[in-house]
Image (cartoon, rainbow, N blue to C red):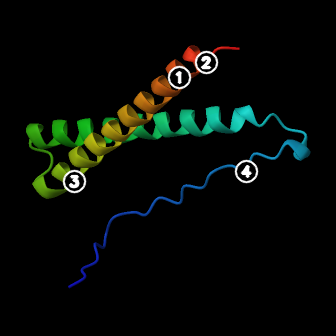
Amino acid sequence: MTTTISGLPVSNFQFPAATPEAGGDSSSGFADTLRNAIDEMGKTDAESSTAVTDLLAGNRSDVHNVMIAVEKADLSFQLMMQVRNKIVNAYQEIERMQF
């Protein structure tokens, strides 16, 4: 049995192409991607905070949408923490290398 979830926006995330032939700095692709992901996480967190505040103030009555917003913010935060952990682990691994 397969069910689909509808109504949730699908992320059109694409990895930037790192091509040294293009004459651009290939290291800025990762930094820009990471910065954009952090900004998107901040937006998701702000939206969920606003939704919770509006619900508590009585301006909203759709508890299910507020819970969805809170869960999206929680998942994006957990994802960013895992990305941070991977980056720290990679940095520590590079530190341990002997040249």
Q: Relative to 34, say whether 65 is above or below.
A: below
Describe the element under mark 3 as helix, strand or loop.
Answer: helix
Neighbours of disc 4 within 10 Å: few (<14), some (14-19), many (20+): few
Q: Where is residue 79 in the image (x, y as percent from the top left)?
A: 37, 41
* Label ID, residue 17: 4
Which of the marked residues, 3 or 4, is nearer the chain's N terminus? 4
User: In screen coordinates, is 76 left or right of 28?
Assistant: left
Neighbours of disc 2 within 10 Å: few (<14), some (14-19), many (20+): few
Residue 62 visible? no
Q: Which of marks 1 and 3 is in front?
A: 1
Describe the element under mark 1 as helix, strand or loop.
Answer: helix
Gap in Å between the C-alphas at discs 1 and 3? 37 Å
Circle 1: residue type: Glu
Do the residues under discs 1 and 3 have CB atoms within 8 angstroms? no
Circle 2: residue type: Met
Q: Relative to 93, say whether 59 is above or below.
A: below
Residue 29: image quadrant is top right
Gap in Å between the C-alphas at discs 4 and 2? 28 Å
Q: Looking at the image, which residue is at 18% across and 49% down?
A: 66
Q: Which is nearer the eye, 14 or 48?
A: 14
Question: Pointer 2: what residue?
Answer: 97
Describe the element under mark 4 as helix, strand or loop.
Answer: loop
Q: Position of residue 26 (x, y in %)?
A: 77, 37
